[in-house]
Amino acid sequence: MKWFIVVVMTTQLNVGQQPETPLWIPELVFDAEEECMTFARNNQLKLFSKSIESYKGSVLPTGMKCIDQNLMNELGEIYRKNNNEELI
């Protein structure tokens, strides 16, 4: 099973006034959850800094989590269906 880091950004209102929680997902893949969690903990400041940079400072990170490939696929389908996130 593959694991991915997801940085959850501050909730905001989009143009349609619907709540939206943007995500930032670095291009990192891990073979085990513990490996993912260790990397995330050891690199939190760098990951948060890059996530802020990717949103040009307009949205701030509020948390970070490692998710498995199945959940990553589900998130991708939800965002593609709603067409509200280009980076996922």
Image (cartoon, helix red, strand yellow):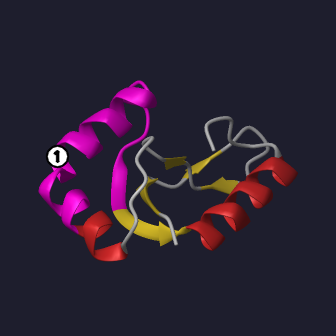
Q: Residue furthest left?
A: 42
Q: Secondary structure at mark 1?
A: helix
- Looking at the picture, tell me which residue is in the foreground, 27 or 45: 27
Q: Is residue 61 above or below residue 55?
A: below
Position of residue 31 in the picture relative to residue 43 (left or right): right
Q: Measured from the top left, where is residue 17 in percent x and y?
A: 73, 48
Q: Residues within 10 Å of mark 1 (few under 14, many from 20)?
A: few
Q: Residue furthest right?
A: 81
Residue in the image at 27% along x and 45% along y: 48
Residue in the image at 35% along x and 27% along y: 53
Instruction: Indicate yes or no whether the magenta region holds residue 58.
Output: yes
The quadrant of the picture occupied by the C terminus is top right
Q: Measured from the top left, where is residue 56 in percent x and y?
A: 41, 24
Q: Measured from the top left, where is residue 2 in percent x and y?
A: 50, 65
- Looking at the picture, tell me which residue is in the foreground, 10 or 71: 71
Residue holding disc 1:
45
Instruction: Indicate yes or no whether the magenta region holds residue 39.
Output: yes
Residue span colored magenta: 38-63
Q: Residue furthest top?
A: 56
What is the magenta segment's predominant secondary structure?
Answer: helix
Q: Residue 5, located in which quarter of the rendered image? A: bottom left
Q: Is residue 7 above or below residue 59?
A: below
Residue in the image at 35% along x and 62% along y: 64
Q: Residue 4, located in which quarter of the rendered image? A: bottom left
Q: Is residue 84 above or below residue 21?
A: above
Q: Residue 19, located in which quarter of the rendered image? A: bottom right
- Looking at the picture, tell me which residue is in the foreground, 32 or 10: 32
Residue in the image at 61% along x and 37% along y: 87
Mark count: 1
Q: Which three-letter amino acid code belongs to the residue tagged 1? A: Leu
Position of residue 65 in the picture relative to residue 42 (left or right): right
